[in-house]
Amino acid sequence: MKLGTYISELLFNHDCVVVANFGGFVCQEFNAHINEATQMFVPPSKKVSFQGALTDSNLLLERYISKKQGISFTAAQEIIATEVETWRTELKEGNHIKLEDVGRIYINNEKKVSFQSDINANFTHCCIKKII
């Protein structure tokens, strides 16, 4: 089971998804604007960052997994704990953690957990209406 899929799904409707005992994925919204240099329209966007200090779960992820998989809240917590342990092991071994449609987590040169968001990820629901 990949937590990245659930995190990605939740970020469309929530500004913060915390993975217990690991960190939180936080979205920042950017309004639509005109790029002055290119004179091109830039649509609204919502980009994600990682905050390692957010380790106390907001229980959003646990509830979501419980509902999506039809399992108990406790079972969802166990799934997350197991995945976090796997992530920690992978990071200690120097590997990157790829979260589909969210980004990748890795240990930087300063031996700290870092995050690079997926350049294609935009968690904004955007509708362009046809003007007649």
Image: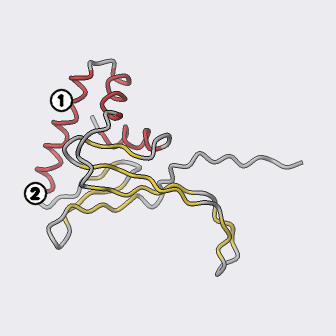
Q: Secondary structure at mark 2?
A: helix
Q: What's the CA distance linking mark 2 and mark 1?
A: 21 Å
Q: In the depicted view, which residue is nearer to us: 54 or 2?
A: 54
Front label number (2 vs 1): 1
Q: Which mark is residue 95?
A: none
Q: Position of residue 98 (x, y in %)?
A: 29, 52
Q: Residue at x 30, y 39 (%)?
A: 3
At horizontal 27% and vertical 42% (from top left) the residue drawn is 19
Tell me if residue 61 comes above or below residue 93 in the rendering.
above
Q: Amino acid at mark 1?
A: Glu
User: Which residue matches tag 2?
Assistant: 92
Point 32% across, 37% down: residue:
58
Q: Which residue is label 1 attached to?
A: 78
92 displayed left or right of 131: left
Of the image marks 2 and 1, the number of the one nearer the N terminus: 1
Residue 33: quadrant of the picture: bottom right
Of helix, strand and loop, which one carries label 1?
helix
x, y percentage for residue 10?
Answer: 43, 39
Relative vertical location of residue 7 with respect to residue 37 in this rendering, above or below: above
Q: Residue furthest right?
A: 132
Q: Is residue 126 above or below residue 76?
A: below
Q: Give the x, y percent position of residue 76.
A: 25, 27
Seen in the picture, residue 7 relative to 38 is either above or below; the reply is above
Taking depth in this image into account, of 20 and 129 the one nearest to the observer is: 20
Q: Amino acid at mark 2?
A: Lys
Query: Where, by quadrant of the figure, is residue 34 drawn?
Result: bottom right
Instruction: Determine the residue positioned at 64% across, 74% down.
Output: 35
